[in-house]
Image (cartoon, rainbow, N blue to C red):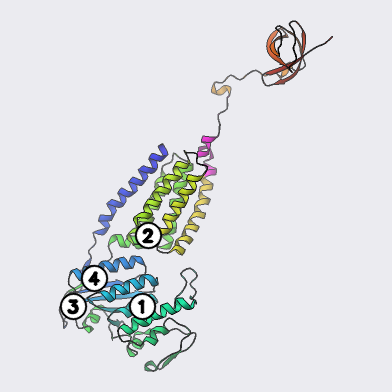
Amino acid sequence: MTLMKRIVSSLVLTLLLIGLILPVLGETVNATTVAPKEGVESGAVYIIPVDQAIERGLEKFMERGFKEAESMNASLIVLEINTPGGRVDTAEKISTMIRQSPIETVAYINGDAASAGSYIALNANKIVMAPGSMIGAAVLVDGVTGNPIEDPKTVAFWKSKMKGAAEINGRNAKIAEGMTDVNMVVEMPEIDYTKGKGDIISLTSDQARKVGYADGIANTVEEAITIMGYSTDDVFRIEHTGAEKAAEFLTNRVVMTLLLFMGIAGVIIELIVPGFGVPGILGIIGFGLYFFGNYVAGFAGSETWVLFIIGLVMMALELFIPSFGILGLLGSASLIVGVVRAAYSTSHVALSLGIASVSALIVIILVAVVFKKRGIWNRFILNDALTKEKGYIPSASKENLLGKNGVSVTPLRPAGTVLIDGERYDVVTDGEFIGNNMTIHVVKVEGSRIIVKPIVD
């Protein structure tokens, strides 16, 4: 029960720490005023940075930004884009958010609008690019291998999405398709260039302006706002909260793998070598930070916490309740499902979980060997020796009686008492009857059991 109390205490401690940290991390200024500049139209302008990989965490952040802009009756939303791309499904949800917004939007590309980032930019009402920036290179690639996806249906679906986004704002749809399909041939006479098979379209700011994929070029976001015809008197930038920044760090693949390693190794070491406390606490904290980061990033729901806690309790119960491994298997499955469901990518978390599990297994084996005398398995092994040093009085050895003769003091039916060398001993026969005062011979000694036979004259 001590181990169960320690696990429950660690869980409560972790949850309390997270509860204390969240309000502090959330107390980040959500908007900062940018220096005002003269413009044509008045009204609040909200800048929402798209400066990270496109995943569900970005979707949640942008959803917060759009809601705040709408609640403040903003006149313009500027999407400040610099991203290598990311998940297509998330980009589609963000783009739907952009299209359905009642507020005019402009994509200001101040770096790369690559892959899914170009799709988000094309869904904005206008596009303004910084010198040296780019848009395009939207070929679908496998998230694990990094190789281009060649499935015709998948490519056709993505190409149609890019085409639709270009057509919404009157842009050349063929160019958008050429950003996704290496097999297309696309002529762009405005920049004296023809995309051939095997190439992919990626446009610089100057090329994008010439082919109608940029409505202007601006060195700063303030210039982009001015180009759109809006005043820079009331410009607000949506910032990531402390919790969101922490979540971005915690959901990094390397950090996520380390947290899983710490969680797996810590919890299992505490279960098999109880009494330390530190590994168990570190394990709970590792898992807690893993779920916290993914929850804040929008990847994990409350069900993942429930699965994790159920799995942990089942694995602990397996040590105290004989279930032929059923509780252990169910607990392990619950933990794995909770960990996998909490991450935004099944393939990424599977790799991280595999690396963490193998590393943790090595550490667990080393700890089990070093602390083998303290392991949980010792509860099922009788290790105490009944020695004189511990106060036990061992039975005297009777091997010296083997082969000796004596006289029966009582009848042996088949057990009785004999006299050998002047001392009385309890003996048995092989089953035959021996009367009183008969000569006997010791034929076998088994521990404290003495077996005799009669001597027949």
What SS does tag 2 mark? helix
The reply to whether the C-beta atoms of the residues labelled 3 and 1 are less than 8 Å apart is no
Residue depicted at 33% across the width and 76% down the height: 120
Relative vertical location of residue 158 with respect to residue 71 in this rendering, above or below: below
Q: In this rendering, does residue 375 appear at all?
A: no
- Name the amino acid type tagged 3: Thr
Q: Which mark is residue 232?
A: 3
The reply to whether the C-beta atoms of the residues labelled 4 and 3 are less than 8 Å apart is no
Q: Quadrant of residue 345?
A: bottom left
Residue linked to disc 1 = 119
What SS does tag 4 mark? strand
Residue linked to disc 2 = 250
- Name the amino acid type tagged 2: Leu
* Closer mark to the observer between disc 3 and disc 1: 1
Check disc 1: other Cα within 10 Å, few if <14, some if 14-19, many if 20+: many
Query: Relative to the observer, which residue lies in front, 430 or 77?
Result: 430
* Closer mark to the observer between disc 1 and disc 4: 1
Which one is earlier in the sequence, the residue at label 2 or at label 1?
A: 1
Residue 371, magenta (yes or no) = yes
- Name the amino acid type tagged 1: Tyr
| The C terminus sits in image quarter | top right
The reply, left or right, for residue 450 in relation to residue 243 is right
Where residue 236 appears, as percent x and y from the top left, is 21, 71
